[in-house]
Image (cartoon, coloured by chain):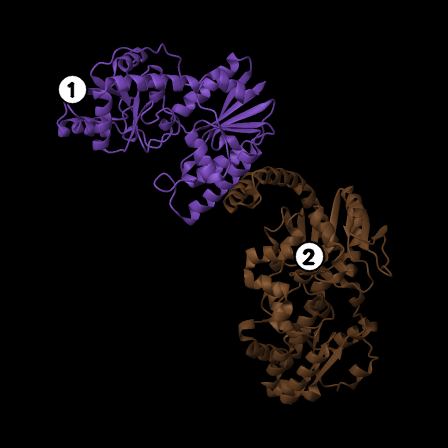
Amino acid sequence: MKVAMVTPMSPESAIADVMTQAIPDLSAWWDLEVWCPSEASTRPCPVRVRPYDHADTDVLNALARYDLAVFVLGDSPWHARILPLAQRLPGLVVLHDASLTNLIRHAAIESDEFELLLRRVEAEFGPESAQILRNPRSLGSPDEWLKFCARVPLHDIATERSLGAVVHSEWHARRVDGRTLGAVTVAPLPVPSTRLGFDANQTSTSSRLVQRLPNDALLLVTVGSVNANRRIDLLLQAIADDDVLSARLHLWCVGPADDGARSELLQLARTLGLQDHFAVAGRVTDTLLQEILARADIAAALRDPVLEGQSASVLTQLLSGTPVVVFDHAHYSELPDDIALKVDPEDAREGLRVALRLLVDDEGERARRGQRARDYVLSERTAGRYAAALFEAGERAMATKPLTHLSSDIGARLRRLGLNREPAVVEAVTDLSFDLFDLA
Amino acid sequence: MKLLVANNAAPFVRGGAEFLADRLVLELRRAGHEAELVRLPLGDTPEQILDGMIAASLLDVVNVDRVIGLKFPAYLIPFPDLVIWLVHQFRQAYDTPPVGWPADPTLDRVVSAVRTADKRAFVSATRLYAISPVVAERLHRSNGITAEVLMTPPHADQAYRTHEAEGFIVALGRISDGKRQVLAIQAMRHARPGYRLVVAGAADNAATLEKIEREIATAGVADRVELIPRFITEEEKLDLIARSIGSVYLPIDEDSYGYVCYEAAMSSKPSITATDSGGTLTLVEHGRTGLVSAPEPEALAAAFDELALHRDRARAMGQNARTLALELDLSWTRVIEELTR
């Protein structure tokens, strides 16, 4: 079977990294080629890579000649030249993010279809949401925009003509269910290859940052962009609430941070008396990240709202053998209970304090959870398992193809009389189709 | 030409539209065409109405040169050469209650779908005809679309004749609430002496017949109203009309011109009809081919009197009615020519 995988191939793209990990196995099953938006450089790949400049008709026609096209999407500009192809050619869509609001908005503006998108959002989410999408700055804060993205994910615009979707958690699968004609497959996202390692010879400490940390200090880390939905403020408050935590824990935030977020958190740390136990490390190299995680005793991943379909940074933390504290919601709830400590987001501050105390007080518990975490990632989150899931999703997508012809035919017939926009008719036809073709 | 006549089908209901469809197929075949009839189910509930629409709009017609659609939802069949001869729309979606559905969120969705589909089908049809001016007028009022009127010929070709009027006015047709024979009976209470009313036809049901009989007794007009409550033969019917002063026919908002009025006209007899009788006004022009009265007993009695007491005038109106009926050219030849051109 000839398959085209349309994915970013930039060396900087973490999504490109995990997709590339699956290619060796996939190329054994499929006659696989990779299509990618052209970049200054592309990462090495074991199959033919065909860069393209524009998502135009020529590219579309070329992709249509494959038996199956796999479109890899995430909510970033890397995917702006992939989305239009996924919208026009029914294929298998791999969704790395649970919200595509930024991507869809950007694409609609670029293609002069923004007003159409606003009308659609108004119909589904109401006029206020359409107004926010028109002018996100009206919300006043990035935090509010993130909440909006979670509430108005717009992923259905990418999946509505698809043959199926691949997601990376059951939680995300439930959100996408019914938004594609085909099946939704949950694939176990592997850890980005740049973060693989954590073997004994890679844990030596070379950075001054790590060297300065007292030997008896317990290091708590967060990994990823330092923004409002990382809830670092809650971590600081939970630590300040507890004398033992205040005395022993050091909290480092690893990941890009803008000046505003950095100064706000530093100010909060000073207010709480934790300034000597708190650092915003900013963006670090993968090598330094490995060093930090190797030194870390506890990790925290407190996304709220959750916008990604799975957390590569949590997987990285688990691989490093670090026990993780997460909110008990979204895909974080799916982590095994003997690995992650899950905190009720409704009682976050006290829940965090209790969870952190448990790990701080019990070195054995930290070690046990850390080891299980590492074992879990090494056994469950492999490139081979990911490729196998993608292959299965591809098989399901092929089985869905006849249904696209059916839906296209029915759609054309209903459109003739304008019935495709009559809710009563659409619901009746959909119900009937579900019954007849076992789509439920 | 290979022609597919498309009509709807309500189980176990057989009325004028079903006769019309059968006859159309027969006449098309007589004219040398290949013709078949397809009937699409139309249920009663909003869900069934919706299902009927969807079924029609998804139907794949093959080995056919033209589809002739008669009634909702049959005229929604997708076909490039679709000629609609509109018998009537789905009036629940257009009229005010009680004929139309009341405002209701569930029903409104179906109404919206019906109107959307209708409008597209009418606009995209190769040609659009209505079976009567009333149907055409309704279509224009509800959808803003103009249809050419192509009236339905009578069901059967009859040996119409006329005789010198005897002393009665005849009320023919199925006895039912909708045809309002009871109104004619009530009118006889106010009518001047010297003539009778003959009501002839099978009753819809026992209750309707009982109501008619009770009305005759209550009004005290048993000596002036003769009731023949049974199916009468064509010969009996033509004889009654031929010997009558004129015919009275009082349906409510009839779609067609009314075969009863046509038969009277062809027998050179005037008709009395009501202002709210709809299509009958096509053949009954007040004072020229008959009389149009308010649907009230006193007013109807005055109309009866006018025909009964001014026989020369009634005779002249009857002759005018026949002339008008002939001018309308209600022949199958014309219908077939139009539908197949």
Secondary structure, mark 1, is: loop
Q: Chain B, which colour?
A: purple
Residue A37, percent from left and from top: 81, 56
Give the residue drawn at x 65%, y 61%.
A99
Assess disc 2: are there few (<14), some (14-19) or many (≥20) residues with their C-alpha within 10 Å of its C-alpha. Answer: some
Are labels 1 and 2 assigned to the same chain? no
Q: Which mark is residue B194?
A: 1
**To which residue does mark 2 refer?**
A108
Is B324 in front, or is B170?
A: B324
- Name the amino acid, label 1: Gly
Image location (x, y in percent) of residue A170:
61, 57
The relative height of residue A80 versus residue A253 in the rendered view (above or below) is above
Quadrant position of residue A248 = bottom right
The chain to which mark 1 is attached is B
Q: Callout 2: residue from which chain? A: A
Q: Is residue B55 above or below residue A116?
A: above
Report the front residue among A184 and A248: A184
Q: Give SS at disc 2.
A: helix
Q: Which chain can be seen in brown?
A: A
Question: From the viewer's perspective, is residue A9 above or below residue B145?
Answer: below
- Give coordinates of residue B272: x percent, y percent: 29, 25
Residue type beneath disc 2: Ala
Asked if residue B108 is positioned above or below residue B215 in the image, the reply reads below
Res. A195 image quadrant: bottom right
**Which image quadrant: the N terminus of chain A?**
top right
